[in-house]
C-alpha cells in the first residue's frame, strides 16, 4: 500500500515510515506525488485539521493520503498552544523561539502538566476516512534538554523515563510518543478497514 503524506516535514515522514513501514505501508512526501500544496489549518480541533489536510492532498493526487495534526496542550495555559503549536507566536519563529516563548509564558506557573496530542487521518480515494488519536503525558521543563526530536521535544519531560523527549533515541520516542500511539491505533483501524470491520 502506498500513501502520500500531507506534510512537507521530513522528520514527521521519518517517524511515520519507521512505524508504518513494518506494516507494509510505503509513505512518500507530497513532492514525490507531484503536488505542492499548503493546506490552511482552519479547524478548531486536531481532528478537523487532520481531515482538512488529508482530504486536500487526496483530492489533488487521487492517492491514499495520510496526515498528522499534532501539538502540545498545556493545562495551565488553558490548552494552548494546542492546534496553533506550529504557529505559536506567529509565522516568523523557529522551533527554538517557539518553545522559549512558551517557557516565558509559563513563568510563575506551578502546574506544568502537559501532553502531546496527535491525530492521524487517512483519506481514501473512495471518500472513506480512518481517524486515530494518540496522547503522551508529560511535564514542561524550565529549560531545554537534549538534541533530538523537533518542535517542543526539548522542553517536554517524561517523568517515568527521567528524560526530555529530545533525549530519547528515535526508537525510544516511537515507543511512547503521541504519534507512535496514534499510529498504533491507526494500524488496528486500518486492519479492521481492510478486513471489512471498520466502523
Image (cartoon, rainbow, N blue to C red):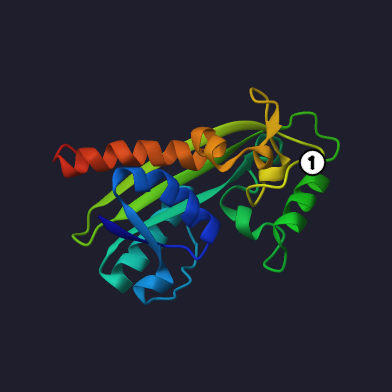
Q: Residue at x 34, y 41 (%)?
A: 186
**Is label 1 in a helix, a strand or a loop?**
loop
In the figure, residue 164 lies in which quadrant?
top right
* Left or right of 105 in this view: 138: left
Q: Residue furthest left?
A: 196
Q: Quadrant of the N terminus?
A: bottom left
In the figure, residue 37 lies in which quadrant?
bottom left
Percent across and percent down for residue 88 are 68, 57
Percent across and percent down for residue 171 are 53, 38
Q: Quadrant of the C terminus?
A: top left
Q: Residue furthest right?
A: 108
Q: Residues within 10 Å of mark 1 (few under 14, many from 20)?
A: some
Q: Residue at x 13, y 41 (%)?
A: 196
Residue indicated by mark 1: 106
Percent across and percent down for residue 126 are 18, 60
**Does 162 sit above or below residue 87?**
above
Q: Residue at x 64, y 60 (%)?
A: 87
Q: Nearer the viewer, residue 73 or 99?
A: 99
Let me know if residue 31 appears in the view: yes
In the figure, residue 165 lies in which quadrant?
top right
Q: Nearer the viewer, residue 83 or 188?
A: 188
The number of numbered discs placed on residues in the rendered structure image is 1
Percent across and percent down for residue 132 are 37, 41
Let me know if residue 199 appears in the view: no
* Left or right of 162 in this view: 15: left
* Left or right of 42 in this view: 145: right
Q: Nearer the viewer, residue 77 or 144?
A: 144
Amino acid at each position: 500500500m502506498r500513501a502520500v503524506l500531507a506534510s512537507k516535514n521530513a522528520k514527521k515522514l521519518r517517524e511515520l515510515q519507521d512505524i508504518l513501514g513494518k506494516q507494509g505501508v510505503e509513505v512518500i512526501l507530497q513532492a514525490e506525488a507531484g503536488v505542492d500544496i499548503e493546506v490552511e489549518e482552519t479547524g478548531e480541533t486536531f481532528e478537523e485539521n487532520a481531515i482538512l489536510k488529508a482530504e486536500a492532498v487526496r483530492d489533488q493526487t487521487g492517492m491514499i493520503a495520510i496526515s498528522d495534526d499534532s501539538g502540545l496542550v498545556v493545562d495551565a495555559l488553558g490548552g494552548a498552544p494546542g492546534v496553533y503549536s506550529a504557529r505559536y507566536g506567529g509565522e516568523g519563529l523557529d522551533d527554538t523561539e517557539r518553545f522559549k516563548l512558551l517557557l516565558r509564558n509559563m513563568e510563575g506557573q506551578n502546574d506544568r502538566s502537559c501532553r502531546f496530542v496527535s491525530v492521524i487521518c487517512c483519506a481514501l480515494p473512495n471518500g472513506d476516512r480512518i481517524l486515530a488519536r494518540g496522547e503522551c503525558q508529560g511535564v514542561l521543563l524550565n529549560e531545554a534538554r537534549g538534541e533530538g526530536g523537533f518542535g517542543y521535544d526539548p522542553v517536554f519531560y517524561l517523568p517515568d523515563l527521567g528524560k526530555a523527549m529530545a533525549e530519547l533515541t528515535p526508537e525510544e520516542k516511537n515507543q511512547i510518543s503521541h504519534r507512535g500511539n496514534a499510529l498504533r491505533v491507526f494500524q488496528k483501524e486500518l486492519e479492521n478497514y481492510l478486513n471489512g470491520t471498520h466502523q
